[in-house]
Image: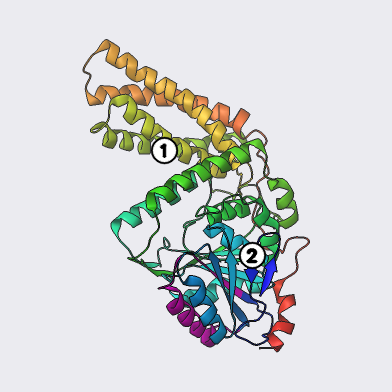
Amino acid sequence: MLIDASTDVMIADRVGGAELPLPVVDVVIPVHDEETDLEPCLRRLHAHLSEQLPYPFRITVAENASTDSTVAVARRVAAELPGVRLVELPEAGRGRALRTAWLASEAPVLVYMDVDLSTDLAALLPLVAPLISGHSDLAIGTRLAPSSRVVRGAKREVISRGYNLLLRGALATRLSDAQCGFKAIRADVAAQLLPLVEDTGWFFDTELLVLAERCGLRIHEVPVDWVDDPDSRVDIVATAKADVAGIVRMLRALAAGRLPVAELRAQLGRSPLPGPLLDPVPGVPAGLVGQLVRFAVIGVLSTLAYLVLFVLLRGALHAQAANLVALGFTAVANTAANRRVTFGIRGGAGAARAQVQGLVVFGLGLALTSGALAGVHALAPNPGRSTELAALIAANALATLLRFVLLRAWVFRSGTAPSLGGDSLPRGRVNVRGDLPSALSQR
């Protein structure tokens, strides 16, 4: 047993009592008080990897401060099954366990999955294959793809979809399912990004993914079959609060420039492909006129969405509250759509700043529409719904004109060069395939 004096982490130096070839894939299972589920998980996972994975592998149990017999179970199974290793941490925290195990691994591809094995293991090879080939930098399982098959209760379904919608709106991410417990990352990328990830709990992998996306890394999504574990002990309320706190912390760090996104993008990100700033749209001219046409189309769609939301919410909320919620939702989507379509800016760089500035513009629009509603109610204490909508349409027309001027002159003034995700491998990176022959020859 090896002991890292700096962290008090204990790592087994032999696996299954025999020397094994260096692994290509290291599957890490973070566990805390999992004495019941751990052994069935390890045996099922080991059997699948032995039969289905054509590369040397290792399973690492990242035990973090368990108070039951989890450690004893892990040691017993590790002594019996070749390729199983135990890492012991004195402090609890899924994120802390993953960071420690990943940074201590010599495998070029690092995987994480939950001990309940809710995800069908048939998705494991499709998860790691793009990383082994060098095509992608990270890979995640997604339960929200059209072809995914998921069995879980309505409560968890609503929470999962709501959380991912919050992420997409607040952090401008394009990831479909940030919290699925089924992910993989290249070791060279992990070495660069993990020291910047602050969270040690459940927000850890979301923070890692958002940072990777901002740095221009390619994230591969794999549709999975997923069956909810009815015995899950995750505290949903506490986890949700921690996730919201993590989102706020990331927004502040990105706005303040505390994360070296630009430097990492230059070092790790994929080079842009040569091409036009915007895909040509038949019948739509380029330049200012083209921007006006695209902006107008997005504006009409946003206004329709806003009016629908307002009508739906008006039955349960006061007019001003319904206006605030409807305008807030559509403002975030409108800024993202104009950034991508109207002004041709792609990639995650600057997206958070644009959303903050977009919210300022949203505030001006809110003032105009709220003022219009206040004026209508001042003139007629109980106006009809049609009168309210007519006032809002007029106010929205003025707000839309103001929005275009501010978006073009302020929010996206310097956003003329989009970042197109290229296919070439980034500078300073070694293709994983170059590291495989020696490992495969030992298989």
Q: Are marks 2 and 1 in contact (CB under 8 Å)?
A: no
Task: Using the rendered view, name the quadrant where residue 305 is placed.
Answer: top left
Whether residue 137 is visible to the viewer of this picture, yes or no, is no
In the rendered image, which quarter contains the C terminus? bottom right
Q: Quadrant of the N terminus?
A: bottom right
The picture places residue 309, in percent across and down from the top left corner, at 32, 37
Q: Amino acid at mark 2?
A: Val
Residue drawn where x is 67% and y is 70% of the image: 105
* Left or right, 319 with reference to 433: left
Magenta-span inclusion, residue 9: no
User: What range is drawn magenta here?
Assistant: 26-54
Q: Is residue 269 left or right of residue 356?
A: right
Name the residue at 51% across, 52% down. Answer: 203
The crowd level at tag 1 (other Cα within 10 Å; few <14, some 14-19, many 20+) is some
Observer-side mark, 2 or 1, equals 2
Q: Considering depth in this image, is 186 or 377 the residue closer to the camera? A: 186
User: Residue 392 appears at what percent x and percent y?
Assistant: 35, 25
Q: Residue at x 59, y 55 (%)?
A: 208
Identify residue for label 1: 329
Q: Which residue is mark 2?
A: 9
Residue 271 in the image: above or below residue 22: above
**Which is more toward the observer, 349 or 23?**
23
**Going 47% across and 35% down the picture, which residue do you hit?**
296
Q: Is residue 301 visible?
A: yes
Relative height, residue 41 to residue 313 (above, below): below
